[in-house]
Image: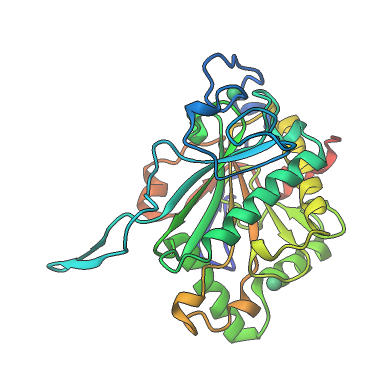
Amino acid sequence: MPELRKDPVTEGWVIVSTERRKRPTDFPSLPEEEDHAGCPFCPGNEDKTPPEIIAFGRDGGKPNTPGWKVRVVPNKFPALGIEGELDRRGLGMYDLMNGIGAHEVIIETPDHNRHLKDSTVEEIQLVLRAYQQRMEDLLKDPRLRYTLIFKNQGGQAGASLHHPHSQLIATPVTPKKVREELIGSQRYWELKERCVFCDIIRQEQDTGDRIVYENEAFVAFCPFASRFPFEVWILPKKHSPDFHTITTGHIPFLADMLRIVLGKLASALGNPQYNYILHTGPARFARRGYWETIEQDYHWHLEIIPRLTKIAGFEWGTSFYINPTPPEEAASYLREREV
Ligand SMILES: [Zn+2]
Ligand SMILES: [Zn+2]
Ligand SMILES: [Zn+2]
């Protein structure tokens, strides 16, 4: 029997379809290696990107030269532009504003074929510190309400370049997906005076059957209402609404988490294409008091979504998702994988 499951945060429904059950080997995988000729993210080609914003690891060398370990540059073809004033206006009944925002690329490594799962904890820490620094900096801009960090790995996941990189887009409005989570978290708080994500962590630790991996500071599990096969969420165990406030002491644990979880996914699914997205609290200073309980009710997290199934008409038309792999099965496959 298929099962309908409700996400406790967004209240979206998912159909867990055991009739169409899929095992890890039923999904397509991705070649590991690729030629780096002409890659604008490879060392030596620094002049093929716009001038860098920050770089780590270059010992005293000049900006935009080789020697870096992590490098952040503006996107050459930005979705939103950083220059100008935010101009909100109406067009009859319609609302519009000019496309102010930021679009940056975090080049995770100088090595064209070294993916996060193959990197050391030290190397991943630098990537996380770059996320944190860029987010802190953009949060100071009163025109911007939200900063989303995400990664597209593989062509099906939206990547146009193979060289390991993540992206950041800062927007002048709070994105709808995030708003749904914020509203859901607030609703739960009003009802129970507890953070819904903290409650989810407690329940997942109690039952254990959807847990993928835990370390001292983070927990990874396949959510109860997983929309996609092998969807994994990573959450800090200690309540915190904002990713950028992560302590230096916790960054190594998050790096360990990412390395292990991405390694397990690669090992179970044969190097799948995937997206991950970092959901964190929105900028609050611009509209003081707008999200009054966010410090207590929202909890930042990373959602990893392997791209194994296609989103089709039913999903577009309903926002229902059909998931052919129950999260309990996915978690058990992932737990078993040694990395
Ligand atoms: Zn490259
Ligand atoms: Zn919490
Ligand atoms: Zn989320």
- Residue beneath the point at 64% across and 23% down: 112
Q: How many numbered callouts?
A: 0
- Closer to us: 102 or 62: 62
Q: Is 11 displayed left or right of 211 in the figure? A: left
Could you say which is closer to the camera, residue 87 or residue 222? Answer: 87
Question: Relative to residue 199, is residue 261 depicted above or below?
Answer: above
The residue at 49%/85% (across/down) is: 289
Side (left or right) of 304 relative to 215: left
Locate residue 45: give its quadrant: top right
Residue 255: image location, x then y, percent: 77, 47
Front residue of 17/220: it is 220
Residue for point 12% across, 67% down: 92
Which image quadrant for residue 287? bottom left
Ligand 1 - quadrant of the structure image: top right
> Residue 122: x and y, percent?
81, 42
Q: Is residue 323 above or below residue 161?
A: below
Question: Is residue 180 at least partly visible in the picture?
Answer: yes
Placement of 204 over or under 256, stated as above or below: below
- Image quadrant for the C terminus? top right
Residue 266, given in percent of the width and then of the height, sits at 71, 32
Residue 301 located left or right of residue 217: left
What colour scheme does the image use? rainbow
Image check: 119 left or right of 175? right
Q: Nearer the viewer, residue 188 or 89?
A: 89
